[in-house]
Amino acid sequence: MREKEKMLLGQKYDAFYDEELTLERRKVKDLCFKYNSIEPSNRKVRDELIKKIFGKTKEKLHVESNFYCDYGYNIEVGANFYTNHNCVILDCAKVKFGDNVFIGPNCGFYTAVHPLKAEERNSGIEWAKPINVGDNVWIGGGVTVLPGVTIGSNTVIGAGSVVVKDIPANVVAVGNPCKVIKEIS
Protein backbone atom coordinates (compact mmCIF):
# COMPACT_ATOMS: atom_id res chain seq x y z
CA MET A 1 0.00 0.00 0.00
CA ARG A 2 1.31 3.47 -0.92
CA GLU A 3 1.99 5.99 1.85
CA LYS A 4 -0.67 8.32 0.40
CA GLU A 5 -3.28 5.56 0.67
CA LYS A 6 -2.31 4.99 4.31
CA MET A 7 -2.56 8.73 4.98
CA LEU A 8 -6.04 8.99 3.48
CA LEU A 9 -7.19 5.96 5.53
CA GLY A 10 -5.95 7.48 8.80
CA GLN A 11 -3.22 4.85 9.20
CA LYS A 12 0.40 5.46 10.16
CA TYR A 13 2.39 6.62 7.15
CA ASP A 14 5.78 8.06 6.24
CA ALA A 15 5.20 11.80 5.98
CA PHE A 16 8.82 12.95 5.75
CA TYR A 17 10.50 10.67 3.28
CA ASP A 18 7.79 9.48 0.88
CA GLU A 19 8.54 10.94 -2.56
CA GLU A 20 4.90 11.09 -3.77
CA LEU A 21 3.69 13.02 -0.72
CA THR A 22 6.73 15.29 -0.78
CA LEU A 23 6.05 16.20 -4.41
CA GLU A 24 2.34 16.84 -3.69
CA ARG A 25 3.20 19.14 -0.77
CA ARG A 26 5.78 20.98 -2.87
CA LYS A 27 3.26 21.48 -5.69
CA VAL A 28 0.54 22.95 -3.46
CA LYS A 29 3.03 25.10 -1.54
CA ASP A 30 4.09 26.60 -4.88
CA LEU A 31 0.39 27.27 -5.62
CA CYS A 32 -0.05 28.88 -2.18
CA PHE A 33 3.03 31.04 -2.78
CA LYS A 34 1.56 32.13 -6.11
CA TYR A 35 -1.85 32.78 -4.52
CA ASN A 36 -0.31 34.85 -1.73
CA SER A 37 1.57 36.92 -4.34
CA ILE A 38 -1.50 37.96 -6.35
CA GLU A 39 -2.76 41.48 -5.72
CA PRO A 40 -5.83 41.52 -3.44
CA SER A 41 -7.71 43.57 -6.06
CA ASN A 42 -7.29 40.79 -8.66
CA ARG A 43 -10.21 38.75 -7.29
CA LYS A 44 -10.92 36.80 -10.47
CA VAL A 45 -7.42 35.28 -10.67
CA ARG A 46 -7.32 34.71 -6.91
CA ASP A 47 -10.69 32.93 -6.94
CA GLU A 48 -9.66 30.70 -9.85
CA LEU A 49 -6.41 29.69 -8.14
CA ILE A 50 -7.88 28.99 -4.69
CA LYS A 51 -10.46 26.73 -6.38
CA LYS A 52 -7.53 24.80 -7.88
CA ILE A 53 -5.93 24.48 -4.45
CA PHE A 54 -9.04 23.32 -2.55
CA GLY A 55 -10.50 19.86 -3.17
CA LYS A 56 -14.11 21.03 -3.22
CA THR A 57 -15.74 24.44 -3.12
CA LYS A 58 -19.15 26.00 -3.43
CA GLU A 59 -20.02 29.55 -4.44
CA LYS A 60 -18.88 32.69 -2.61
CA LEU A 61 -15.56 31.99 -1.00
CA HIS A 62 -12.92 34.49 0.02
CA VAL A 63 -9.50 33.58 1.37
CA GLU A 64 -7.25 36.42 2.51
CA SER A 65 -3.49 36.17 2.09
CA ASN A 66 -1.47 34.62 3.48
CA PHE A 67 -2.88 31.14 3.20
CA TYR A 68 -1.00 27.85 3.58
CA CYS A 69 -1.90 24.17 3.38
CA ASP A 70 -0.20 20.78 3.01
CA TYR A 71 -2.14 19.15 0.16
CA GLY A 72 -5.24 21.20 -0.64
CA TYR A 73 -7.24 18.29 -2.08
CA ASN A 74 -8.39 17.33 1.43
CA ILE A 75 -10.01 20.74 2.02
CA GLU A 76 -13.75 21.20 1.38
CA VAL A 77 -15.47 24.54 1.89
CA GLY A 78 -19.16 25.31 1.74
CA ALA A 79 -20.94 28.33 0.31
CA ASN A 80 -20.18 31.77 1.69
CA PHE A 81 -16.81 30.79 3.22
CA TYR A 82 -14.41 33.44 4.52
CA THR A 83 -11.03 33.15 6.18
CA ASN A 84 -8.99 36.13 7.27
CA HIS A 85 -5.21 36.56 7.01
CA ASN A 86 -2.68 33.86 7.93
CA CYS A 87 -4.83 30.75 7.88
CA VAL A 88 -2.97 27.42 7.99
CA ILE A 89 -4.75 24.15 7.16
CA LEU A 90 -2.56 21.08 7.52
CA ASP A 91 -4.84 18.73 5.61
CA CYS A 92 -3.29 15.27 5.84
CA ALA A 93 -6.87 14.18 6.56
CA LYS A 94 -10.10 15.75 5.36
CA VAL A 95 -10.88 19.26 6.66
CA LYS A 96 -14.48 20.11 5.90
CA PHE A 97 -16.19 23.47 6.47
CA GLY A 98 -19.95 23.88 6.10
CA ASP A 99 -21.82 26.84 4.64
CA ASN A 100 -21.46 30.33 6.15
CA VAL A 101 -18.21 29.70 8.01
CA PHE A 102 -16.19 32.76 9.01
CA ILE A 103 -12.64 32.40 10.32
CA GLY A 104 -10.66 35.17 12.02
CA PRO A 105 -6.97 35.92 11.39
CA ASN A 106 -4.09 33.67 12.46
CA CYS A 107 -6.08 30.46 12.76
CA GLY A 108 -4.76 26.92 12.31
CA PHE A 109 -6.46 23.61 11.55
CA TYR A 110 -4.11 20.69 12.12
CA THR A 111 -4.99 17.09 11.25
CA ALA A 112 -1.57 15.46 11.73
CA VAL A 113 -0.91 13.36 14.83
CA HIS A 114 2.69 12.64 15.83
CA PRO A 115 3.99 9.78 17.98
CA LEU A 116 4.99 10.49 21.57
CA LYS A 117 8.04 8.22 21.44
CA ALA A 118 11.00 10.15 20.02
CA GLU A 119 12.44 7.31 17.93
CA GLU A 120 9.14 6.77 16.09
CA ARG A 121 8.53 10.51 15.72
CA ASN A 122 12.06 11.03 14.37
CA SER A 123 11.45 8.39 11.68
CA GLY A 124 8.83 10.64 10.04
CA ILE A 125 5.86 8.45 10.93
CA GLU A 126 2.54 10.18 11.60
CA TRP A 127 -1.18 9.65 11.07
CA ALA A 128 -4.08 12.03 10.63
CA LYS A 129 -7.60 12.61 11.91
CA PRO A 130 -10.23 14.69 10.09
CA ILE A 131 -11.66 18.03 11.20
CA ASN A 132 -15.32 18.90 10.58
CA VAL A 133 -16.83 22.36 11.01
CA GLY A 134 -20.61 22.69 10.67
CA ASP A 135 -22.72 25.42 9.07
CA ASN A 136 -22.94 29.00 10.38
CA VAL A 137 -19.79 28.77 12.50
CA TRP A 138 -17.74 31.79 13.54
CA ILE A 139 -14.17 31.15 14.63
CA GLY A 140 -12.39 34.06 16.32
CA GLY A 141 -8.82 35.15 15.68
CA GLY A 142 -5.90 33.05 16.83
CA VAL A 143 -7.87 29.81 17.22
CA THR A 144 -6.15 26.42 16.92
CA VAL A 145 -8.24 23.35 16.00
CA LEU A 146 -6.55 20.01 16.64
CA PRO A 147 -6.91 16.61 14.91
CA GLY A 148 -10.20 14.73 15.07
CA VAL A 149 -12.33 17.67 16.22
CA THR A 150 -15.90 18.37 15.13
CA ILE A 151 -17.43 21.80 15.71
CA GLY A 152 -21.22 21.80 15.53
CA SER A 153 -23.37 24.16 13.48
CA ASN A 154 -24.31 27.65 14.70
CA THR A 155 -21.39 27.71 17.13
CA VAL A 156 -19.00 30.54 18.02
CA ILE A 157 -15.40 29.73 19.04
CA GLY A 158 -13.84 32.62 20.97
CA ALA A 159 -10.55 34.21 19.98
CA GLY A 160 -7.39 32.48 21.16
CA SER A 161 -9.09 29.16 21.87
CA VAL A 162 -7.39 25.79 21.48
CA VAL A 163 -10.04 23.28 20.41
CA VAL A 164 -8.90 19.83 21.56
CA LYS A 165 -12.25 18.00 21.62
CA ASP A 166 -15.64 18.15 19.91
CA ILE A 167 -17.77 21.24 20.49
CA PRO A 168 -21.57 20.81 20.12
CA ALA A 169 -23.92 22.89 17.98
CA ASN A 170 -25.50 26.16 19.14
CA VAL A 171 -22.95 27.18 21.76
CA VAL A 172 -20.26 29.72 22.53
CA ALA A 173 -16.99 28.03 23.50
CA VAL A 174 -13.69 29.62 24.53
CA GLY A 175 -10.40 28.94 26.24
CA ASN A 176 -7.43 26.61 26.37
CA PRO A 177 -8.66 23.98 26.33
CA CYS A 178 -11.80 25.27 24.61
CA LYS A 179 -14.95 24.74 26.69
CA VAL A 180 -18.61 25.61 26.28
CA ILE A 181 -19.51 28.72 28.26
CA LYS A 182 -23.10 29.23 27.10
CA GLU A 183 -25.79 27.96 24.80
CA ILE A 184 -27.11 30.06 21.93
CA SER A 185 -30.90 30.01 21.90
Image (spheres, grey):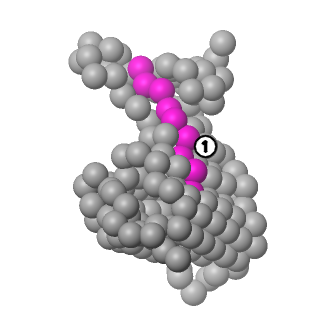
Between 112 and 174, the one lying in front of the other is 174
Is 181 magenta? The answer is no
Q: Few, some or many C-alpha atoms within 10 Å of disc 1 (few <14, some 14-19, many ≥20)?
A: many
Kindly give the residue lying farthest to the right in the view shown: 59
Mark 1 lies on residue: 94
Between 10 and 54, the one lying in front of the other is 10
Residue 86 at x, y percent in the picture = 40, 66
Between 156 and 51, the one lying in front of the other is 156
Residue at x-position 33% and y-position 56%: 178
178 above or below 170?
above
Residue at x-position 45% and y-position 41%: 147
125 above or below 97?
above
Quadrant in which residue 44 is drawn? bottom right
- Principal SS element in the magenta part? strand
Residue 167 at x, y percent in the picture = 46, 54
Circle 1 — which element? loop
Q: Is residue 137 visible?
A: yes
In the visual, does 172 lie left or right of 159? right
Is 130 magenta? The answer is yes
Residue 81 at x, y percent in the picture = 62, 71
